[in-house]
Amino acid sequence: MTEPVTWTLDNGIGRIEIDNPPVNALSNAVRKGISDALKALGDERSLTAVVIACAGRTFIAGADIREFGKPRQPPTLAELCDQIERFPHPVVAALHGTALGGGFEIALACHARVAAIGTRIGLPEVKLGLIPGAGGTNRLARIVGAVEALQIALSGDPIDSDRAHALGLVDKVTDGEPVSQAVALARALKQPPVPTRSLPIEGAESAALEERIAKALSKTAGQHAPAAIVESLRRAIALPFDEAVAADRETFADLSAGAQSKALRHAFFAERQAAKFDSPVGSGKRIEKVAILGAGTMGGGIAMSFAAAGIAVLLIDTGTEALERGLARIQSNYDRSVSRKSISADEAERRLARIATATDRASAADADLVIEAVFEDMDLKKQIFSDLEAICAPDCILASNTSALDIDAIAHVLKHRDRFVGMHFFSPANVMKLCEIVRGADTSAATIASAITVARRIAKIPVVSGNCDGFIGNRMVAKRSAQVDRLLQQGALPQQVDAALKAFGFPMGPLAINDMSGLDIGYSIRKRRGTSFPIADAVVESGRLGQKTGGGYYRYEAGSRTPIADPEVAALIEQVRARLGVVPREFDEGQMIERMIYPLINEGAKILEEGIAQRASDIDVVWLNGYGFPRWRGGPMFHAGTVGLSEIAQKLTLFAEETGDASLMPSALLVRLAGAGATFDDWDKGTLRDAA
Ligand code: 3HC
Ligand code: NAI
């Protein structure tokens, strides 16, 4: 095996190169390699300075997350950063790609930094439930000041090379390769170099800092890492450098052994795993030309996602009026992004220019991919795909964005069903990351692979789902909705139900969400299927359709989207309870959470058992990216492992007995895994399948 770290000495400049694909993560071997190289170079009499650079696509993208929880070999990253900072000659980092987490900490310990233009720099530890573990917050604060350091460490979002330069984090940005510039800078630095630790922290006592801290903590209640980052910064301000970094290391170790960081690491790998699909044709067909049918809410959002990725699309609707309406909505979305400064006016214009329009279906003739997003009407969809088959090339991929129709029933009209697939985007489609790739009975592996690849190109997180009612996400939501209604029937109020799930970590409660989307859609689906949710039905039948009518489960003041508890709704609920003969009881928050979350996990287990989802972690990805499940709980299936499967199975049995609803009984898979003391992760690893 080749060494991941090598060094050379040329004309007084030592060059340390890290080559540890794919992202030059700081494994045990890399840390040791850099340390040994520095020691060896330090012994060279002709040495005047050192440049640290990386081969491949990126500078060091952080600690090796796969090594967390495994034995660590010396040196620790903190020791390595000290060694760099205390090196008697200047050490300059040459950055390209990304310099993240531990990679950025190494760069901060260096005496100067040069970055290729476009390099992204940041401390994403918070997204893994961690704090920078090797003095990152401390050194960063000494370069950019306390307020900016807090912002960078708490958001976890990378900043680009220009911003890094403006903040003084990068000494030079180059549009060429950074190593030669780093060598030139290394020669110019004074000897011995100034260590970052000796700089003061600006803004340490400022009111602005306290204001930011209070705001950040109020938004992240219940999460350990943000609070720990604040503490780390306070220590950086109050304590001697070494003492503060030693305390950071302890905090890092505690956090990385904790449930929240494990959940967030699970989410990181689950998202990458979800996009993996074993296909004999690799990543599938290269897609260049895309047509979207339907310029409504979804079609417009999907078109914006392609435009953002630099891919031109043709948006087709039935008439100029519908197209104008669609384009006006797209334009107003761009205007909002420009006013919020999330994109520049030029970029908005470039994106808009990538969206062409047509009123004739035949203009999709040369497309490689057509995504249909017209009204949710089976006959209409069948007609459209039957036409498209005649219009488009035989290998054009035909995709439907249907959220509730049977993919195989639509495919039935096609002669070549292998190239037909569901691509279920979520609303607003230009924002939401999730895309369920729905596999019909005849969809080919090549078509799935192509859909996954194109979804990734437009920055979506694809998850393959089998074809069933509601696919993965909505099928599970339906189970939760039934329990939400049951809680209301039995004694809870809408605001209590929503507060419970918000306390669990969802950004919004399910009933406030329903009010936002409109209650009539669910109502008409229930009527079509002959099912009933007594409270939900009563709310709709009283004329309350949600925000659009000024009231649903809550009331809304004119022009406001803030839900306000409404005594009229409480009275309505009382009437239904009386009609059903229910004597209301009280539920505490924990009971409500269990009654809403456990049935959802149970349905996830059935989805897994039936092979609708490839992996339990895919189900987690669906919930993290489509339904606001708190990321620091890892998703419902991971969360189940944290609670314990036998506890969940027991409670489900109890709920089933108590309500007489046999559908709440734990699924066979849940019972079996619980009996084996296993988790869904064990199922994913394949260790228990043979016994199934
Ligand atoms: N450790 C181990 N593996 C990593 C990794 C890391 N830090 N970062 C990425 N990988 C792996 C991915 O799992 C993936 O593996 P796979 O091909 O087997 O699925 C492969 O590298 C490529 O990753 P992506 O598919 O994500 O590639 P992209 O080009 O889309 O993105 C990236 C590259 C921006 C670097 C992205 O991978 C990323 O954000 N990585 C995580 C960065 C991070 O969180 N660093 C901080 C780590 S914690 C830390 O440093 C603690 C310190 O303070 C002590
Ligand atoms: P919408 O009503 O906003 O838009 C539908 C568009 O299709 C309209 O502009 C209409 O003029 C156009 N259209 C109708 N017939 C057409 C035809 N023959 N050719 C071309 N265009 C035609 O509907 P929305 O909400 O965008 O939904 C579209 C599809 O996406 C539906 O299948 C829906 O189930 C699905 N979906 C909707 C989600 C949502 O939250 N709105 C989420 C996920 C999927």
Image: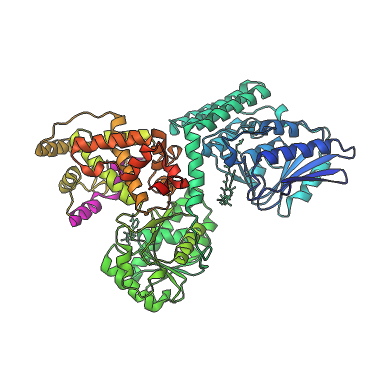
Place of residue 640 in the rendered image (x, y in percent of width and height, measured from the top left): 38, 38
**Can you tell which quarter of the image residue 147 is in?**
top right
Residue extending furthest toward the bottom: 390
Compared across the picture, whether 571 is left or right of 157 comes to left
Q: How many marks?
A: 0
Q: Is residue 421 magenta?
A: no
Q: Residue at x 18, y 51 (%)?
A: 531
Residue 572, above or below 532:
above
Place of residue 623 in the rendered image (x, y in percent of width and height, measured from the top left): 39, 46
Residue 550 in view, yes or no: yes
Out of 407 and 691, give the one closest to the viewer.
691
Residue 554 in view, yes or no: no
Q: Main secondary structure of the magenta part?
A: helix
Q: Residue at x 51, y 44 (%)?
A: 268
Residue extending furthest toward the right: 45
Residue 482, above or below 243:
below
Residue extending furthest toward the front: 691
Place of residue 282 in the rendered image (x, y in percent of width and height, measured from the top left): 53, 63
Q: Which residues are magenta?
A: 508-529
Q: Is residue 521 magenta?
A: yes
Out of 156 and 82, give the one closest to the viewer.
82
